[in-house]
Amino acid sequence: MKNLIKIKGDASFRKFFRKKNNHHTSIVVYSKKEKFKNLLVYDAINKILNKNKILAPILYKENYIKDYIEIQDFGNETILKKLKERKDEELSYFKKIIKLLIKIQSIKSRKIKNFLNRSYEIPKYDKKILIKETNLFCDWYVKKNLKKNNKDKFSKDFKKIIKKLVSSLKLKNNVFVHRDFHVSNLMLVNNRIGVIDSQDALIGSKAYDLASLIDDVRLKTSKLFKKKIFDIYLKKQNKLEKLKIKNDFEILSILRNLKIIGIFTRLAIRDGKKDYLKLIPYSWELIGMRIHKNKIFQDLKELLNRNFKGKLNEN
């Protein structure tokens, strides 16, 4: 394929290229591994988003046999990049993002035809998936950082605690969940916010993407700012759900950051992407910030403090 310029990838197996055409550019997404998810599902989810007036990349061309799709180019202006340039606009952008999140969570579509004309239905974000994801912390970070005897005992206790926490979630799994909803996956496109990297979307808890956005490992914000954004979201919810959202937000934030520590360790060990290790200390900080708020986390807090002294910077 001619006129291709390789651009920076992400944490997946995909490769991205910018293609120069006569008067515009497009993005070629190449994925030999996990191509069902990274090509077919990605396009199906983008179609659902666009159908519901959420800006997502449009498919221009597909060649599933040759492992690529060609999609709309949203440029390079992530919201993260914009916020680093204009810190004073942080609150304004987050208000817009919360409005967008609520719109995404109102999506009723669950099924769509993918580009091979096969029906795709967004799966449920069930407890098994949530537990399996969180256990990535044991599979990679614990395996690397604890001795064998300690590791086996830790993993057994950890998995028991995580099951208990997951069973304490109160919200129904009934909204569209992007699963990686943060400012690096939100693009500024002609003064609109576009959504990318949505191939992992499931139907789950409305607290999950909120936790992903507010407790974002890539963007450090103050506790006061986090509370302000949380309260803006909460004001738009009905009274019956507010307490459930507070409960589930804290649990899901902790579970997500444990998963992230596991994933980032895996990326460094398996894929040689060592830059992700720099983000792990802030994941620990986010866990520490949430873990002291609720007695439900007492067993987890004691387990983590016993095995990873000094990692939980509770404040």
Image (cartoon, rainbow, N blue to C red):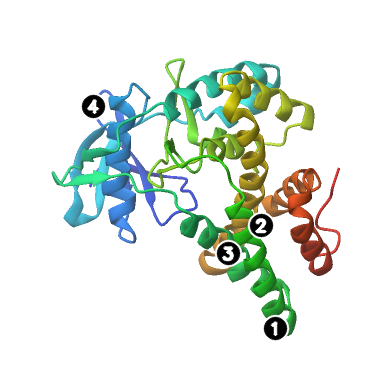
Q: Are marks 3 and 4 in contact (CB under 8 Å)?
A: no
The amino acid beneath tag 2 is: Leu
Instruction: Give the foreground label among 2 and 4.
Output: 2
What is the spatial separation of the Cα atoms under label 1 and label 2, in whole angstroms?
22 Å
Q: 189 or 292: which is nearer to us?
A: 292
Q: Earlier in the sequence, mark 3 or mark 4?
A: 4
Q: Earlier in the sequence, mark 4 or mark 1?
A: 4
What is the spatial separation of the Cα atoms under label 1 and label 3, in whole angstroms?
17 Å
Q: Residue at x 54, y 18 (%)?
A: 96
The amino acid beneath tag 1 is: Lys
Task: Identify residue for label 1.
Answer: 148
Q: Seen from this angle, which residue lies furthest front?
A: 240
Q: Secondary structure at mark 1?
A: helix
Q: Which mark is residue 277?
A: 2
Q: Earlier in the sequence, mark 2 or mark 4?
A: 4
Q: Which mark is residue 135?
A: 3
Q: Earlier in the sequence, mark 1 or mark 3?
A: 3
Q: 160 or 21: which is nearer to us?
A: 160
Q: Write down the quadrant of residue 260 in the picture.
A: bottom right
Q: Residue at x 59, y 31 (%)?
A: 80
Instruction: Give the foreground label among 4 and 1.
Output: 1
Q: Secondary structure at mark 3?
A: loop
Q: Residue at x 52, y 68 (%)?
A: 270
What is the spatial separation of the Cα atoms under label 3 and label 4, in whole angstroms?
48 Å
Residue 246: percent from left, percent from top: 66, 35
The amino acid beneath tag 4 is: Asn
Task: Identify residue for label 4.
Answer: 22
Position of 243 compared to 208: left or right? right
Q: Write down the quadrant of residue 213 in the picture.
A: top right
